[in-house]
Image: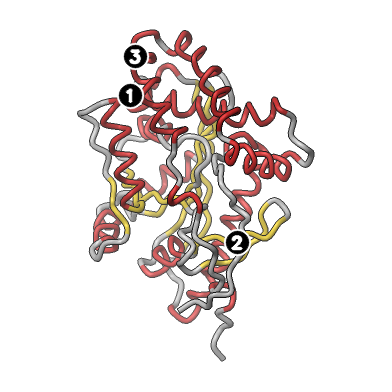
Amino acid sequence: MTPDPAPDLPILKPAEWISYRERGSTGLLKVMVFLSLRLGRTLSRTVLYGIALYFFWFAPGARRHSRRYLRLALGKNPSAMDRFRHILYFASTIHDRVYLVKEQYGRFDLTIEGEAEMYEFLGSRQGAFLLGAHMGSFEVMRSAGRRQPGLHVSMAMYENNARKLNAMIAAIDSDAKPDIISLGHMDAMLKIADRLNHGAFVGMLGDRTLGDEPLQPVTLLGERAYLPTGPMRAAAILRRSVIFMVGLYRGGNRYHVVFEPIADFSATPAGARDAAVREAVDRYAQLLDRYCRSDPYNWFNFFDFWRERTDKPAS
C-alpha cells in the first residue's frame, strides 16, 4: 500500500511576499549604512525609532498581518506598543547587519545553544542542512562561526532573494562575498551536494512558500498553515541531517543563537522517505511555534501567512 500523498497536495494562492517590495529592508539599509558607520551603534540606533514609526503608520498591510500574528503569538490582542516593538526588532536586526557584515562582533553579547552538537558535526565533516526562518538575524550566525573555526555556511535561496541579499551586503562591504546558491536552476542540487560533500553547511529558510510547490499542512500557533516540503525532501534525497537554526534578537546588543537537530536522513530507506519528510516538517513547525511564542517580536513575516488554499490540484 502506497502512503497517502494528501499532506503534500495543497496549493495556495500566489504568495504575497513574492511581489512585495521590501521597503523595510533595502530602504532602511541605505540610510543605516551611512549613519551606522559614522555615528556608531549607540547614536545611530536613535534613528531606528523614527524609521520604525514611519513604517508603523505607512505600511497598513504589514501592520495588519503583524497584528494577526502577534494576537496568536502573545495570546492576546496586541497593543500599539507590541506592534511597534515588532517593527522595531526588525529594524534593529537590519541595523546590526551593518556591524555583523563588517565583522565587528565585539559589539554584541552573544550566547549559543546547541554549540556542542555543532562541534560534533564539524568534526565529522559530513555537512548538513541548516533550516531557519525569517526570524531574528541570520547574519549573527557569522559571529557564531567565529567561535567555531571551520564553520562554512552556504545559503540556498531563490534568485530574486539572492540578488537582494547580495545587493544589501555589497552596500555594506564591497569586499564581502557570501556563498549563495540560487535555487530554480538545473545545477542547484549539484552545487548543494558539492558543498555538503566538502563538509560545509547549507542554509535554507523553510517558512515561506511560492504557492505552487508541494506543501504540508501543519498547526502553527493554533491555526492551520502550510509549509513547503522542498528543503526536507532535498535533505532526504541527499541523505543528510537537518538542523534548526535561529539567531534571536533579545534587545540591546543581545542575541541568542539556537542550533537544534530536526532530522537525520542518512539511514532513511527510500520507501520510508515520505513519512520521514512529513515527520521532519512537523518537527520544524513545532520549533517555529516554540520560538514564535518565546520570542514573538522576532518573526518577520509581515504577510498573510495563514492564507487560504485554492482548489487547484497539484500536478
Vertical arrangement, residue 86 with respect to residue 109, above or below? below
Residue at 56% x, 55% y is: 284
Q: Earlier in the sequence, mark 3 or mark 1?
A: 3
The image quadrant that residue 22 belongs to is: top left
Local crowd at mark 2 within 10 Å, few (<14), some, or many (≥20)? some
Q: Residue at x 38, y 54 (%)?
A: 128
The residue carrying mark 2 is 282
Q: What type is the residue that disc 2 sits on?
A: Asp
Mark carried by residue 37: 3
Position of residue 217 in the picture relative to residue 243 (left or right): right
Residue furthest to the bottom in view is: 1
Q: Amino acid at mark 3?
A: Leu
Left of 84 or right of it: where is 200?
A: left
Percent position of residue 1, x then y: 57, 91
Tell us which disc is closer to us: 3 or 1.
3
Which tag, 2 or 3, sits closer to the chain's start?
3
Closer to the camera in the image, 121 or 111:
111
In the displayed structure, 14 sits above or below 75; it is: below
Coordinates of residue 139 in the picture (x, y in percent): 40, 34
Name the residue beneath numbered marker 1. 103
